Amino acid sequence: MPVASAWFDAPPLGARAHGLTFIFLTRYISTMESTFAVIAEPSRRAILSLLASSEQTVGDIEEALNLSQPSVSKHLRVLREAGFVESRVDAQRRVYRIRPEPLAEIDAWLAPFRRFWSAHVDALERHLDQIDPVPCRKEKKR
């Protein structure tokens, strides 16, 4: 009688010795998918942008983004559960701050892809420099 598991349902990767690698990659991919799903929401990205500059309360975020308190609280809960933010209690309010670890994971995942766009950005910069060199500044006459 066959055992139902991700290993047996998955396409073969070669030898069975690669089973742990497959399990790791499957978990890693699903983690990255859920990470990207969390930051796919524009309001959550806006909240992360605010928190990148400083700690914020729910009220601060409401005011800055013109969102309702229930909406801000919902997005902060998702971000907290995904590990993007953490909070501390300050009197009767919660102050939220960003946690860089999940963003570092995204940065690490993007690293192999940077070579694709960095070469193009460098080429664009060289091209722009050739067609419109930076003019020398002339001092103003008084």
Image (cartoon, rainbow, N blue to C red):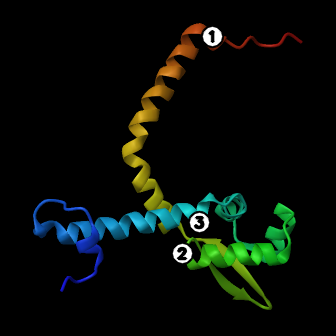
Picture coordinates of residue 84, whole percent (x, y): 57, 71
Q: CA distance from mark 1 to mark 3?
A: 41 Å
Q: Position of residue 118 (x, y in %)?
A: 45, 33
| Image coords of residue 20 (percent x, y) | 20, 72
| Residue 78, image quadrant | bottom right
The residue wearing badge 2 is 83
**Secondary structure of the residue carrying numbered label 2:** loop
Q: Label 1's element?
A: loop
| Residues tagged 2 and 3 counted as in contact (Cβ below 8 A) | no
Q: CA distance from mark 2 to mark 1?
A: 46 Å
Labels 1 and 3: the sequence-earlier one: 3
Q: Quadrant of the N terminus?
A: bottom left
Q: CA distance from mark 2 to mark 3?
A: 10 Å
Mark 2 or 3, nearer chain start = 3
- Residue 48 vs residue 22, the one in the foreground: 22
Mark 3 lies on a secondary structure that is: helix
- Residue 81 shown left or right of residue 137 in the figure: left
Residue linked to disc 3: 38
Q: Residue at x 46, y 54 (%)?
A: 107
**Amino acid, disc 3:** Val
Circle nearer the viewer, 1 or 3: 3
State the residue at coordinates (68%, 64%): 44
Q: Residue at x 86, y 72 (%)?
A: 68
| Residue placed under numbered mark 1 in the picture | 132
